[in-house]
Image (cartoon, grey):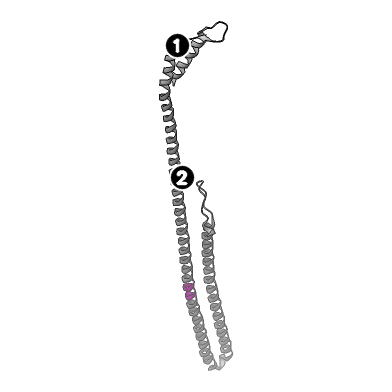
């Protein structure tokens, strides 16, 4: 292309410097020089045109290659996005399954603990009630024996009556005290189990609230809303 421009510049120079024809706007130019320059232009043009075509072909090839690379990049990005979505879905499902298992284990443990505490409290209450009854029966029996012994002695009949009444009253008081202790023990065990159930329910609620919290957006890829399913 440089030779074409150079030949054209030389032709312009020849025409500008050519001797003019009197009384006209024509001029006289050296035919040989002009023809030689025109041959140079004609010889140079096919090569330059081929070079230009090569440039155009390379441009088309570059554009095609860039388009193919762009399509490949978009495809890879879509595959990566689908992979990330699948991994996020699997992770969420694992979290939900783990939380469900943990909740079931917690409830089962709470029920087992409740049953154990209830059984032990019932057994302890029965034992204490029976102990109170036995103590009451022994006290009454001792009072009767003491009463009979005192009655047999005329000089201490009144004292025997008083002692027997005192022993019976103490037996009643002891039985009432043991019954109150038994009720307090059972109430304490039930209060402990109530606290355990409250803690378990707070743990389950915390796990459920954690599952409802949306995942933070880490990329421009839209996050799939699993809760909408």
Task: Name the quarter where the N terminus is drawn.
Answer: top left
Q: Position of residue 125 (x, y in %)?
A: 50, 78
- Give the quarter of the image for residue 90: bottom left
Give the Cα distance between marks 1 and 2: 63 Å
Is 228 in front, or is 172?
Answer: 228
Residue 115 sits inside the magenta stretch: yes
Q: Is residue 180 above or below residue 212?
A: below
SS assignment at label 2: helix
Q: Position of residue 31 (x, y in %)?
A: 45, 11
SS assignment at label 1: helix
Q: Is residue 127 above or below residue 99?
A: below
x 56%, y 92%: residue: 155
Numbered badge on residue 175: none
State the extent of the magenta-drawn residues as a range: 114-120
Is 126 in front, or is 178?
Answer: 126
Q: Position of residue 199 (x, y in %)?
A: 52, 63
In the picture, measured across the screen, residue 58 lies left or right of residue 189, that is left
N-terminal of the pair, mark 1 or mark 2, is 1
Residue at mark 1: 31
Residue 106 sits inside the magenta stretch: no
Is 66 in front, or is 214?
Answer: 66
Numbered badge on residue 74: 2
- How many dots with numbers? 2
Q: Is residue 190 above or below residue 55?
A: below
Instruction: Please rate how many residues cluster around mark 1, counting C-alpha atoms within 10 Å: few if below 14, some from 14 to 19, many from 20.
Output: few
Q: Position of residue 20 (x, y in %)?
A: 53, 7
Between marks 1 and 2 in the image, the one whose residue lies nearer the viewer: 1
Magenta: main secondary structure equals helix
């Amino acid at each position: 292309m440089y030779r074409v421009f150079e030949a054209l510049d030389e032709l312009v120079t020849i025409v500008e410097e050519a001797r003019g024809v009197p009384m006209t706007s024509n001029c006289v130019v050296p035919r040989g020089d002009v023809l030689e320059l025109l041959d140079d232009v004609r010889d140079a043009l096919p090569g330059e045109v081929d070079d230009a075509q090569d440039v155009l072909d390379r441009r088309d090839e570059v554009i095609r290659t860039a388009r193919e690379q762009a399509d490949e990049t978009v495809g890879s990005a879509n595959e990566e996005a689908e992979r990330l979505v699948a991994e996020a879905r699997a992770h969420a499902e694992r979290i939900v399954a783990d939380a469900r298992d943990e909740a079931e284990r917690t409830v089962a443990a709470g029920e087992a603990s409740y049953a154990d505490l209830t059984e032990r409290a019932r057994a302890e209450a029965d034992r204490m009630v029976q102990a109170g009854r036995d103590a009451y029966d022994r006290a009454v029996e001792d009072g009767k024996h003491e009463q009979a012994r005192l009655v047999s002695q005329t000089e201490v009949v009144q004292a025997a009556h008083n002692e027997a009444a005192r022993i019976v009253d103490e037996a009643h008081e002891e039985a009432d005290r043991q019954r109150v202790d038994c009720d307090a023990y059972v109430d304490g065990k039930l209060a402990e189990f109530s606290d355990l159930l409250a803690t378990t329910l707070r743990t389950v609620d915390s796990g459920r609230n954690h599952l409802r919290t949306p995942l933070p957006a880490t990329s421009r890829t839209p996050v799939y809303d699993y809760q909408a399913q």
